[in-house]
Structure formats: C-alpha cells, structure tokens
Image (cartoon, coloured by chain):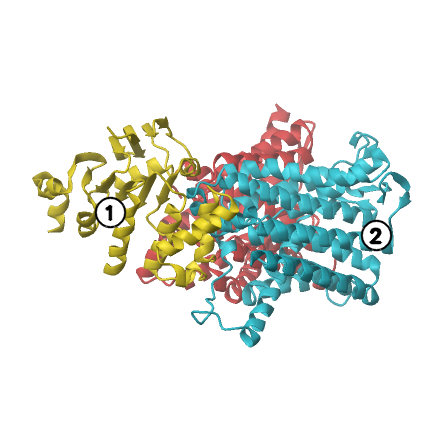
Amino acid sequence: MIKTSATRDVVTTLVVAALLITIMPQLIGTYTLTVLVVYGMLGLSLGLIWGFGGILCFGQAAYFGLGAYTYAIAAVNFGESTLPMLLAVLVPALFAAILGAMMFYGRLTDVYLGVITLVVTLILFKFINSTAGPQYKIGDARLGGFNGIPGFQTLNVPGRPNDYIWGDAYFYFCAIALVIVYLLVTWLLRSSFGRIAVGIRENETRIALMGYDVAARKTVLFAIGAAIAGLSGALFANWAEIVTPGLFSLGQSAEIIIWCIVGGLGTRFGPVIGAAGLAYLKFLLGQQSMIDNTLIIGLILVFFVLFLPKGILPAVTDIWRVSFGRRKRRGARTRRGRGGRQHG
Amino acid sequence: MDLTFVILVEMLYAVASLILISAGLAVVFGMMKVINLAHGEFMMMGGYATITAVNLGVNIFVAMLIVAPLVVGLIGLVVERLVIRHLYGRLVDTMLATWGLSLFFIGMVTLIFGNTTTGISTPIPGFTVGNYQVNGYNFFIILVSIALLIVMLAVLKATRAGLIARGTMQRSDMAAALGYSPDRIYMATFFCGSAIAGLAGAVLAPLVGLVPTSGGAYIAKAFITVIAGGPSLIAGLISSSTLFGLVSQFFTFAISPVIGEVALLVAAVVLLRLLPQGVTGKFFKGKL
Amino acid sequence: MAETVLETHGLTMRFGGVVASDHVDFRLEARELRCLIGPNGAGKSTFFKCISGLLTPTSGHVFMRGEEVTGWMPHQIASLGVGIKTQTPNVMDQLDVFENIWLAARRFHDVAEANRKAEDVIDRLALGPIARTNLGELAHGERQRVELGLVTVGDPWLVLLDEPAAGMSAQDVERMTDIIHELTRTAAVVIVEHDMQFIRSIAQKVTVFHQGAVLMEDHVDAVMSDPTVRNVYLGKKA
C-alpha cells in the first residue's frame, strides 16, 4: 500500500511539474520565472525543517546568503562552476550542523532558537557589510562589503568553462533542480528518518523516551534544510550575477517565513507555491509606485496569522475534502492548531 | 586621565542606550510573555513623531518626552486591540504577526514621509575634555535611562497598579482568579510598553539619521537584551544591558565599531547557550 | 538467584534546600513487579525521573544490568531496552495509533519488522478499530493504552510506569492489570501509583517512600498492616 502511494506521489509530482514547466513560460518571462523557482526551493528548505521538523529558524536567509557567497567566491577562484556548486551546498550544511549541534544539544526552546538564528544572520550581515576594504579577500575574490561580489563565473557545462548555461536553458536547469530536490524531500519524509522527524515535531520527549537521539536528528534535519537553502542561494547568484549582503538581511528571512505560512505549513508544495506566488506579487507591486510593497507584504502576514493560520494549501484541501471527500470515521475533523509550531 | 573619562562616559552611554532600547520590549515581554517584533518600528515612529512635532513648533523636549510616548502608546493600544489580543498564549504566532506589523509600519511611514533620511540636531551642545570632544547629549541619554528605571521601579514597588502588575507577572491565572481582568491589564501594559518604546525612539532620534527602516537596527539588540536578561524585569534589563554594553564598547575601542556590534551578538549567542533561562534565570532569582 | 536489573546506591536529589530524594538504595530483580507508593511529595516521582534520565541526580549512582547509567540522557537509557511512561500522557497527537506505535518499534527493528511488531501490539491491546485514528481524537483511557503499547513494543526488559492507572475507568484499569501481568513474563516492572485498589490487585512487593527516603519495603499485605505506614500514608486518607 505504501509502495503504490509513493509511486502515485512521484507520478503526480512529475506530471504537475512537467505541466508547469511547459505552461508557465508562455505566461511569464523565463528570466522572472527562474527567480520564482529559486525562491520556491528556498521556501521548501524552511518548509521542510519548520513544517515537518518543528524547527522555526528565523535565519534561513543566512544559509541562502552563505550558499550564494560560497558559490561566488569559489567561482572567482576556480574559474568554473561545478565544484563551486557543490561547495555552495556543503558549506551552509556544515555551518548549520555546527550551529544546530550547539543549539539542540543545549536543549534550547523555540524563542531562544529564534533569537540565536536571528542573531547569527545579523552577525553575517554586519560582517559581510564591513568587508569593503581590499584586505578582505579569499583567494582572488574580494568580499567587497556592501558592494558585493560581481562578475564571477556563472554556470557552465561541467568540464567546459566556456559553455555557459543561461537564459531559457538556465530556467529549465533550475526548474529540474527544484523537481529533483522536491522528490528528494518527498523520499526523505517517507523514510524512517522523516517519520521520526515528524514524531519529534509532535512530541520531543516521547521520541527521546523511545530511545531516539533527538538532538542529533534535529541537527541533521537542520543541516539538510541549510543545504537546500545553500543550493538555492547558488542558483540565485547565477541568476543575479552578483551577490550582495542584502541576501543575509532580516527582511529576506522574514519573507521566507511568510512564504511558508501563506503557502501552508506541514505540506511540501505549500511553501514552494507560497514563495513563487508572493515573490511574483512583489514583482508586480514593484512595478507600481502607488503603495509601498512592504506595507502589503506586512498586511498579508498579519492577515494569515490571524485568519488563515494553516495557510492556503491546507485550507484548499480542507474545502476539497469537505465538499467531495469521503467522510472520515469519527465524523468531524478536529480543528487543532498547527501543532508543530507550538511544540518545542 | 581625559581619555579615561571619555571612555567611562562612552561605556555608560552604551549601557544606557541599551536600557532605553530594550525597556519597552522588556515590559511587554515580562508581563505578557509577548515578543513584539514591531518594537523597532515603534521606536522609529517615536522618532518621526518628535520630528513632526518639532516642525510644528513644539519645544523639542516636550516633543520627545511627552508627544512621542503618547502618540506611540496610542498606536500600541490600537495594535493590541486589533491584533495582539487574539494571539495571547501563542508566542510564536505573536512574533510572526508583529513581524508583519513591523513591515506594515515601515511601508506606512515610507508612504507618509518618503524613503529619505530626516533628522533633528541634538538640542545639547558638545564640549571638550582635554583633547577629546564629548557629545553633551550622551549625558542626557544616561539621565533619561536612569530616570526611566527609577520610575519603573517606583511604579512597580509603590503603586497598586504595580502590585497588580507584579502579581500578573508571576501568576497571570491567579491575578485573573482574584478578579483583575487580564484583558485590561494587558491592554495597559501594552500601552506602557509602546509608550516607553516611543520615548526611547524619540530620545535617540537626534543621534541617528531617521529612515523608515531605522527600526531594524534596534529590534535585534532589544530582543537579545530582553531574552538574555531573563525573567526579572529590572534586574534583567540592567544586568544584560551592562554586560552587552561593556562587551560592545570594549571591542569598539579595541578594534572597530563593526567588530563591537559583532562582539555584542556573539556574546549574546554564547550567553544564551550557557544560561538558556537568561541572566536572572540563574542569578537574582525572584528580584524585580 | 535472579539477576539484578536495576540498582541505586545512595541516590540523592536536591532542589535548592529541599531534599526530594534522600540516599535511596534500591534493588530490582529480573521479571520482578514492584510498586512505589507514598504520600504526595514523598519523592516517588523524583526517584522515578532520576532512574529514567529525566533528571540528573545530585549524588549517588544508578546501575542497570550492572552498567552504571548515572546522568545518562533519557534516550540513552531507553536505548538499553527500557520502556518508560511518564506521568502525563506523552503521545504524538497529530499521528495515528499505528504511527505512534510504529515509531517506537522502528527504534529497535528494521522497517518490515517494525510494521509487523506494530500490528502485533495493536492486536494484543485490542486497538485494531482505532488504529488509523489520530491520538488527539482519542479518549483518555485509549491514549493511556496506546502509550503502554508504544512502551512495550520494543520488547523491553525493564518497564518504568508513572501512574499508569490515573484517570482510567474500572474497565480500563482491569485491562491495564492484565497487560502488566503479561509484561512481567519478560520484563521487570516498576510502577509509581496512588491507587491502592490497583496496587493490591497487581503487586506483591511494595516500596514505601516517605520524605524522600525509603520507609519500608515488603509484601503488599505486610505494608498495608504496618502501623508506621498507616500513619504516614493511609492514616491521612482514612
């Protein structure tokens, strides 16, 4: 039974992805679409650790920025893109593993986790911002402070540094990368590791009393989330062709959290669609100057926390189930809060 | 000798400004266990309120000490009624909603005042000690923060409202059982917290160029100072402000202001790892 | 001579000035069933938390099957093959009964075996009809039974239960008694309990706590008729 539902899941994912990849470029330019896809992956990274692991990270942007900077610095030094891409995944993951081990073995609770991840993002932001001087360089790459690092080698066909992947091809590359990451996340959540992670979200003490090392598992999940965020950061760097300290900003972290809430926590697709949708909305709002778009983003967040705390996707599936689904045994669905977010 | 004096003043100033920045948040967090992430924007609005009032011809001290706290307090009251009160007891949700509010206020202020830097000059002239220039306004900041602490202590210790407040801090359920409406207590608390934030923003405004995004510079510092301070309101505020103020000033003098800021943040991370309940969770237990 | 599975030497726990557990020496043999009783605040629960790793004792030693486990984390103790049920129900509300039990089984077995084991326990505890219902929707007695299921699914050789019968109906208590009796065929069981009725129906040997220390340790009937025990514990109830 589990086997068949897994197959169905994969097939659904592939069909939906294929449809979107074919249809969307007819509606929106591939240049804009690329960044929506990249943000979708970033949303997925937080959706995984927050929605399924119960770890609310206020600094997911730190890994996004770290991935982007790692890629840029490595690309300047190596003059090709394959190794830098790998490093952009590994460096944030390693950083998160160290930070996560420090926090989770210290048994810190929600609020403290929030403070520390937020503060670490700020430290990176301030540090990178202050590296304008020529003495701040790693290999051949000058960090450039608030000006960032421009002009690094962008994505090329592995082994052929002069064959760049750009334009439409780059969009398809990112879209396929997202599909692969999405499928990997699906597989992870179906594995024992993922099921235990959900158990930890639900009740940490109980999982510990069963004999699982909760701190180690949370650390690993946290690092996986960082790896995905790092990959999206590297893809973003390739798209923007410049990396700046703004990638680490609190505003960026806030947006990732908003994507997850709006899209729907505890789902895989919700954060992706939340990210792409809101980023596109922001893009559209950016084209008019009547109303400041921060104002609207802020209102959306407040509105969702107050009135639609489970997000769009769960709300839609709820409506669908009520209207067309089979009646669940024991009648009414219980309307409990988003457990994951309140538990430690 | 002159240098020692200047450094001493700078140190005191660093501690005092941290106390100012954090006090409003500490009141709200201590009483209601609500983290208001729009705290920085409340301060920013305090600054704008002051500048607007001064431009309308109000005396600058009146604007800072009376107008700004009132305006921001009222904004806080509206926010509490419309948003916060639906979210009591849901710590993470309040943080998210207030984060949304913070973005909303940034947008709002940008819409009204534009995305440009405004500012007012400090009303107190500087003077020199030996070869060093000292900003006279720093003394004003130190005085205001001391006065604020004394007023807070006096209110908590000596008034009926303070007694109710202390009771609510310890056991909000019991205070409710004794017939005090937590709803009204929370409303009053949030008003006070917002007003203090407005005051702080107003008093600090002459020192910084004010932009709609100014709040971001305050919120992280306030947040970590309050959390690191732990459950005791005033003792926590003083101890963590002192600690972080000294650490950041030490590194500012020794290396550079940026390293000073980074050192403050690193100190916060290390401190929270070692004392997850905050300074007063470990020491000064049960003090105010 | 049966093997000793749990032993403490001079186990002491202080909270500030309060000594909640005072030099407790305790021995439990394989497949033994032992109840810990005592009035409120006697230190039963503190003792329980110290041996299950939820608290680190101020001083003293804990041994399990001869290995020193003092100061171990709960997950390390559970990994030895110790099933632990805390006083308040500790289950995963948004997951269903099968998933709850499966997660516990998966710790000690591979996926296929965990599936089989979980089905097995669900059959044995008669949870079949509610196997796919989320724990959050179940009645208190059912939740307690599920928790007992996930404690026992790993085939523990030592089971620690804190107030397993609290708040249960008479029928549920009876079922619980049967389950515990069956457990003692393979495991040693320690039960912290208030309910004298329940204790009488299951226990042979009882340890009485008073003011953090062990007051006496004997067969349940001897304990019940002891005047000192009646004074500190039963006397208050009568």
Camera-side residue of A110 and C226: C226
Q: Which residue is mark 1?
A: C193
Q: Quadrant of residue A282?
A: bottom right
Residue positioned 47% across, 68% down in the render: A333
**Residue C99 higher or lower than B11, as above or below:** below
Chain shown in yellow: C
**Residue C222 higher or lower than C112, as above or below:** above
Q: Residue B25 at what x, y percent from top left?
A: 52, 50
> Is residue A310 visible in the rendered structure shown here?
yes
Q: Which residue is mark 2?
A: A170
Q: Residue A234 at what x, y percent from top left?
A: 76, 45
Residue positioned 33% across, 41% down in the render: C159
Chain shown in cyan: A
Residue under disc 1 on the same chain as residue under disc 2: no
Question: Few, some or many C-alpha atoms within 10 Å of disc 2 (few <14, some 14-19, many ≥20)?
Answer: many
On screen, residue B72 versus residue A275, left or right, reads left
Chain shown in red: B
Residue positioned 64% across, 26% down in the render: B3
On screen, residue B215 versus residue C208, left or right, reads right
Q: Quadrant of residue A292?
A: bottom right
Residue positioned 47% across, 36% down in the render: B275
In the rendered structure, which amino acid carries the disc numbered 1?
A: Glu
Marks 1/2 in contact by CB < 8 Å: the verdict is no
Q: Secondary structure at mark 1?
A: loop
Callout count: 2
Q: Residue C104 at what x, y percent from top left?
A: 44, 47
Question: Few, some or many C-alpha atoms within 10 Å of disc 1 (few <14, some 14-19, many ≥20)?
Answer: many
Image mark 2: chain: A
In the rendered structure, which amino acid carries the disc numbered 2?
A: Tyr
Quadrant housing the N terminus of chain C: top left
**Marks 1 and 2, how far apart in space?**
66 Å
Camera-side residue of B262 and A251: A251
